[in-house]
Image (cartoon, helix red, strand yellow):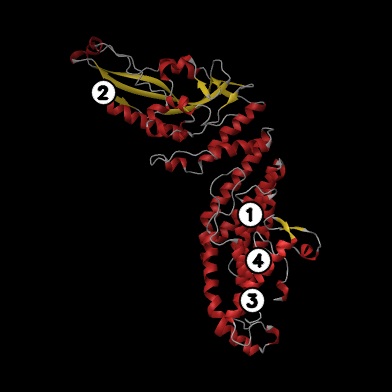
């Protein structure tokens, strides 16, 4: 156990760098978790751990051998001690560690800089894993035969790799400066450890790929989009190669889903860097916007969860952010006519329906084409998801009441009231947003289509003579509005068709840049 006499990080349990052990500096910094600590505290933790290991060893060793140096014990006696006393105690824990490692690697091991979602949560702490690794090192001299010696060595490598990955799971949730560089170091060391284990080759490739992704994240956080692109591309390619290897290794197949997620995350990171480079935007500004958007909590609703929980929707969401950032520099947005200090995104929907009017010989079918507008922020409103009427221009509620005589004679032209909305939507033209603030769209085209379909189901139940065709969500347009404090006022053209969700959300429930 003499080789274990070294300083240990009091935070994560990792052995500190040799230069720190040999130095006389008062403070030392862990290269695995980034914690700075007094040398005396690192020494105190090491002494505590050594005491626990000696106590553990004394329980495993037969009388007369506790505390003795194994180098001075006869090899046959060492073998018998291991097989009789140590192996029955340590093997169950090794098996449990293997199971925990398989559970760990079946989850995504990274979270992008702007992501606020729940990252990987390791069952064991890094301290527990490093301490178990130290226990295994303490019995190395006992496992001398060709069967047990490799098993202990492999268990040491797995426990060390587990500890390093557990360290990363904690780094994902804090704001340690240079945390992605620390994570890259941990993944590198974990890969070195796992390369000593047979059957883990695809996992080693995955870990090395994540090193590239971590460096890409570090670059983008420092405003370096160019190098981020290089590293992200390497990371994506390496992860895809690792995935191919998984199909050849049944024991490693538990990682396939996790690697798919990591590939998607890496491609998103690559897209962010490309966005920043193409639009001449500051990558940090982009990250702040993405951070705000990804931090939003969407309401839980059984009808909507399958759409709002999809990671794939991020691609479309990011494309809206990209177009806004591009318009801020030299591009344009489809802006409707009107004045206002805020541009609010709306989905322009083309709706065709028919209804029956008249009685007896005057009875006939009338076809009508209407426009609906859907605030592209409706997805963050629990009310809009539960009651679609509040999330769009409710044209059937705003219909003018026809006289009984008009209905009998079949002179009704419409049972809806959205004529002015169509004129407003049609005025959209590609223009620079100027200095006006812009609301970020928080919905996809698919989600807008679903909202209209849910709305039409409601309307069909209350309008028995209404026949509806499939709505067409045409495009996203930006309508000039007025922002006063947290209050948003839509143009007068909306009249009594103003979607309730706009005033209900105000400026607090959305993202404005």
Which label was assigned to residue 54?
Answer: 3
Instruction: Give how far apart the Cα atoms at labels 1 and 4 are.
Output: 15 Å
State which quadrant residue 307 falls in: top left
- Taking the view exactly as shown, the residue that stands out farthest to the right is 24
| Left or right, 205 with reference to 420 | right
Q: Earlier in the sequence, mark 3 or mark 1?
A: 3
Q: Residues within 10 Å of mark 1 (few under 14, many from 20)?
A: many
Please state which of the two labelled residues, at mark 3 or mark 2, is closer to the viewer: 3
Please state which of the two labelled residues, at mark 2 or mark 4, is closer to the viewer: 4
Tag 4–tag 3 contact (CB < 8 Å): no
Tag 3–tag 2 contact (CB < 8 Å): no
**Does 154 sit above or below residue 121?**
below
Towards the viewer: 282 or 452: 282
Instruction: Give how far apart the Cα atoms at labels 2 and 4 are.
Output: 72 Å
Instruction: Give how far apart the Cα atoms at labels 4 and 3 are.
Output: 25 Å
For label 1, the residue is 210
Say whether residue 153 is visible.
no
Residue at the image point whose x is 56% and y is 47% from the top: 264
Q: Residues within 10 Å of mark 3 (few under 14, many from 20)?
A: some
Q: Determine the secondary structure under disc 4.
A: helix
For label 2, the residue is 465
| Left or right, 89 with reference to 157 | left
Q: Residue 401, position in %: x, y?
A: 30, 14
Please state which of the two labelled residues, at mark 2 or mark 1, is closer to the viewer: 1
Q: Determine the secondary structure under disc 1.
A: helix
Residue at the image point whose x is 37% and y is 31% from the top: 387
Q: Earlier in the sequence, mark 1 or mark 4?
A: 4
**Does 331 sit above or below residue 285?**
above
Please state which of the two labelled residues, at mark 3 or mark 1, is closer to the viewer: 3
């Amino acid at each position: 156990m003499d080789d274990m006499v070294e300083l240990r990080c009091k935070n994560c349990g990792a052995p500190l760098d040799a230069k720190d052990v040999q130095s006389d500096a008062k403070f030392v910094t862990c290269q695995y978790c980034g914690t700075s600590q007094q040398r005396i505290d690192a020494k105190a933790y090491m002494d505590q751990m050594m005491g626990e290991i000696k106590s553990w060893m004394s329980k495993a060793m037969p009388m007369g051998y506790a505390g003795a140096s194994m180098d001075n014990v006869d090899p046959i006696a060492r073998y018998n001690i291991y097989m009789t006393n140590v192996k029955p105690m340590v093997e169950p824990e090794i098996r449990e560690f293997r199971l925990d490692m398989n559970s760990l690697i079946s989850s995504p091991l990274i979270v992008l800089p702007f992501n606020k979602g729940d990252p990987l949560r390791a069952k064991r702490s890094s301290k527990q894993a490093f301490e178990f690794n130290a226990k295994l090192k303490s019995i190395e001299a006992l496992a001398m035969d060709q069967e047990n010696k490799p098993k202990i060595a492999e268990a040491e490598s797995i426990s060390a790799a587990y500890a390093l990955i557990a360290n990363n799971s904690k780094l994902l949730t804090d704001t340690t400066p240079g945390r992605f560089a620390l994570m890259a170091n941990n993944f590198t060391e974990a890969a070195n450890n796992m390369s000593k284990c047979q059957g883990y080759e695809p996992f080693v490739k995955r870990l090395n790929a994540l090193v590239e992704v971590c460096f890409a994240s570090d670059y983008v956080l420092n405003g370096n989009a160019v190098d981020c692109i290089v590293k992200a591309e390497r990371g994506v390619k390496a992860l895809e190669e690792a995935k191919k290897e998984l199909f050849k290794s049944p024991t490693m197949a538990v990682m396939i889903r996790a690697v798919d997620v990591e590939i998607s995350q890496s491609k998103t990171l690559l897209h962010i860097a490309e966005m920043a480079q193409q639009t001449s935007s500051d990558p940090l500004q982009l990250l702040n916007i993405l951070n705000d958007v990804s931090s939003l909590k969407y309401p839980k609703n059984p009808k909507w969860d399958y759409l709002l929980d999809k990671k794939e929707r991020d691609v479309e969401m990011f494309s809206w952010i990209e177009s806004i950032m591009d318009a801020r520099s030299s591009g344009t947005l489809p802006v409707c006519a009107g004045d206002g200090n805020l541009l609010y995104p709306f989905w322009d929907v083309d709706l065709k329906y028919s209804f029956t009017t008249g009685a007896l010989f005057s009875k006939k079918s009338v076809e009508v084409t209407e426009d609906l507008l859907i605030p592209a922020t409706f997805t963050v409103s629990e009310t809009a998801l539960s009651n679609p009427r509040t999330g769009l221009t409710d044209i059937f509620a705003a219909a003018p009441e026809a006289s009984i005589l008009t209905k009998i004679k079949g002179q009704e032209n419409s049972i809806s009231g959205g004529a002015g909305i169509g004129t407003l939507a049609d005025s959209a033209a590609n223009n620079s947003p100027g200095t006006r603030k812009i609301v970020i769209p928080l919905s996809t085209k698919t989600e807008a289509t679903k909202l209209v379909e849910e709305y039409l189901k409601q309307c069909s139940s209350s309008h028995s003579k209404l026949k509806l065709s499939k709505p067409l969500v045409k495009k996203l347009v930006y309508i000039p509005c007025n922002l006063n404090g947290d209050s948003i006022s839509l143009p007068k053209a909306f009249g009594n068709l103003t979607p309730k969700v706009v005033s209900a959300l105000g400026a607090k429930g959305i993202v404005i840049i």
